[in-house]
Amino acid sequence: MTDTPTIAIAEVTPRGIARVSGRVVAIQVEPSDAPPAFTVRLEDGTGRIDAVFMGRREVPGIEPGTRLSLEGRVCETEALPRLYNPRYELVPSA
């Protein structure tokens, strides 16, 4: 990861670079007849953000309940902010 400070998900701004941390609350995998994409919903108590890993159907170590730190450019969508192919780091539970 870089030296970008971690911020609350509620503070992310569209088109900005953000580093956020939280717990995985949901995972979605595209069906086999669709282009591969692995979507992770992260929650930190202030909000939620989706991280989409294009070209993948899984990311080792990421499952519901996992704590993650994500960094990438924030895309604005109708529902939730989204990061495409973010840098990620598994965060050990305390």
Image (tube, rainbow, N blue to C red):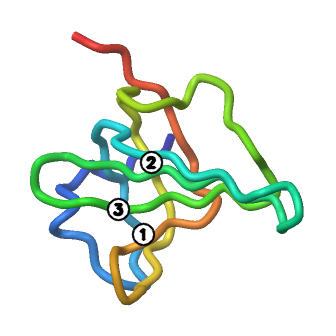
Kind of residue sitting beneath label 2:
Leu
Residue, x 56% and y 52% (percent of image)? 28
> Does residue 89 appear left or right of residue 78 in this picture?
right
How packed mark 3 is, by other alpha carbons closer than 10 Å (few <14, some 14-19, many 20 or more), is many
For the residues labelled 1 and 3, the Cα–Cα distance comes to 13 Å
The one nearer the camera, 94 or 35, is 35
Mark 1 secondary-structure assignment: strand
Mark 3 secondary-structure assignment: strand
> Does residue 30 appear left or right of residue 34 in this picture?
left
* Rendered position, 78 above or below 39: below
**Residue 66 occupies which quadrant of the picture?**
top left
Residue, x 34% and y 74% (percent of image)? 80
The one nearer the camera, 31 or 7, is 31
* Rendered position, 32 above or below 58: below
Query: How many tags in the picture?
Result: 3
Question: Mark 2 = which residue?
Answer: 70
How packed mark 1 is, by other alpha carbons closer than 10 Å (few <14, some 14-19, many 20 or more), is some
Disc on the earlier residue, 2 or 3 = 3
Where is residue 27? Give x, y as percent.
51, 46
Residue furthest to the right in view is: 33
Return the mark for residue 49.
Answer: 3
Cβ atoms under marks 2 and 3 closer than 8 Å: yes
Mark 2 secondary-structure assignment: strand
> Does residue 36 appear left or right of residue 47 in this picture?
right
Residue, x 57% and y 55% (percent of image)? 39
Kind of residue sitting beneath label 1:
Ile
Question: Mark 1 = which residue?
Answer: 17
Where is residue 30? Give x, y as percent.
71, 59
Q: Which mark is in front, 2 or 1?
A: 2
